[in-house]
Amino acid sequence: MYSTHAEREKCVLIGVVHSNFNRSRVEENLEELAALAVTAGAEIITTFIQVRKVLDSAYYLGKGKAAEICDYVHEYELNIIIFDDELTPAQIRNWEHLSGVKVIDRPALILDIFAAHARSRESRTQVELAQLNYMLPRLTRHWSHLSRQIGGIGTKGPGETQLETDRRLVRKRINHLKVDLERIERQRTTQGKKAGELIRISLIGYTNAGKSTLFNALTDANTLVEDKLFATLDTTTRRYQLENGITVLLSDTVGFIRKLPHHLIASFKSTLAQTRNADLLLHVVDVSDSLFQEHIRVVEEILEELNIRNKPILIIFNKVDKINHLGRLHNISKSYQEGILISAKKKIRLDKVRRKISKTILRFTTY
């Protein structure tokens, strides 16, 4: 979906209120989906929300609502339909048949953005692996044959249909990428050992929380900083000397987001190893975002999934320069007494971050 062309694809966003999700929660998710779509190069035309007690196995929404949305798509000549929830391969096929346009879900959109932002060989390999794992159950006989890209003459097995050949080629490519990532991970481990016994600190947080800006402010590095979701995919590590003279390794890592595709987490295992191997985590939060508490919860859930919730964590509330109400800052300080309120962009209270890091490291490390 991602395009560098000036003309953006016109899209409609779809959310469903069901089970434990209330309407306000779905609306919040759709706001984030809109930000993702814009990052991917889309133009948002409208949003549809349907309340359903039972999800439809064929269309996710009711067929009547599906027909209404497709009529809208045809009338306004839209190019794409984007669902906030993950659809089954059959549901996507049904929607594309009914609408005649491209239909994707949130996981596919996130994967598309990652593919556009991947720069290093490692991140490109990770994204391709995640995309292929996502695509495999969604291959159909209408698929543009993969043999043109990763096969050719001599790739087809006896009695195989083209679809079966395509699936086999995808599985073969997946295995090849896994081997590549295992090799990269071994190299990373070896390089880590060469670094000696330096303390490792990782910046973590929701996407666009300002991790890269804080990383640059602390280390005088020149990491890419953009006001976009997932501007940083590749881990950047720098030596950083604390005020007490201790030298540490500080890493800037990929941001998290709600409904992060499972395949993406699995594929980014080697990148996330920086977080898993860290001695201290700096959890950066965009405190100017009204949903910052939800973002904290999402990050904590992903850390739980990665089995790294037991590490020392300093919570850093960034972008205080965007908050005009002192009362709100006071309430945040009261609710999160261990948190540090800063502005990485304006370099406000960074000295407190440095002192807190030094104090925390001395608490659990013996030199």
Image: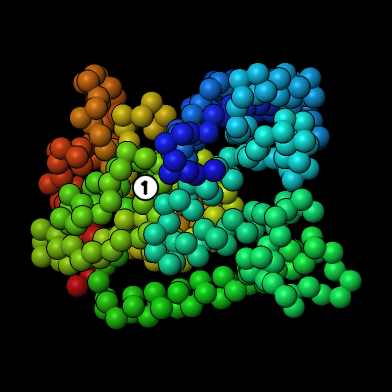
Residue under the point 57% across and 22% down: 47
Q: Is residue 352 visible?
A: no
Q: Which residue is mark 1?
A: 231
- In front here: 362 or 166? 166
Residue under the point 26% across and 31% down: 333
Left or right: residue 316 compared with residue 21: left
Residue 97 at x, y percent in the picture: 77, 36
Q: Where is 364 relative to 114, above or below?
A: below
Left or right: residue 326 compared with residue 43: left
Q: Where is 50 relative to 140, above or below?
A: above
Q: How many marks?
A: 1
- In front here: 33 or 27? 33
Residue 105 at x, y percent in the picture: 62, 39
- In front here: 259 or 282? 259
Q: Quadrant of the N terminus?
A: top right
Q: Where is 356 relative to 71, above or below?
A: below
Mark 1 residue crowding within 10 angstroms, few (<14) / some (14–19) / many (20+): many
Element carrying mark 1:
loop
- In front here: 214 or 131? 131
Left or right: residue 35 compared with residue 337: right
Residue 188 at x, y percent in the picture: 39, 74
Residue under the point 69% across and 28% down: 19
Residue under the point 80% across and 24% down: 63
The chosen color scheme is rainbow
**Kind of residue at disc 1:** Ala
Q: Is residue 135 visible?
A: yes
Residue 193 at x, y percent in the picture: 33, 79
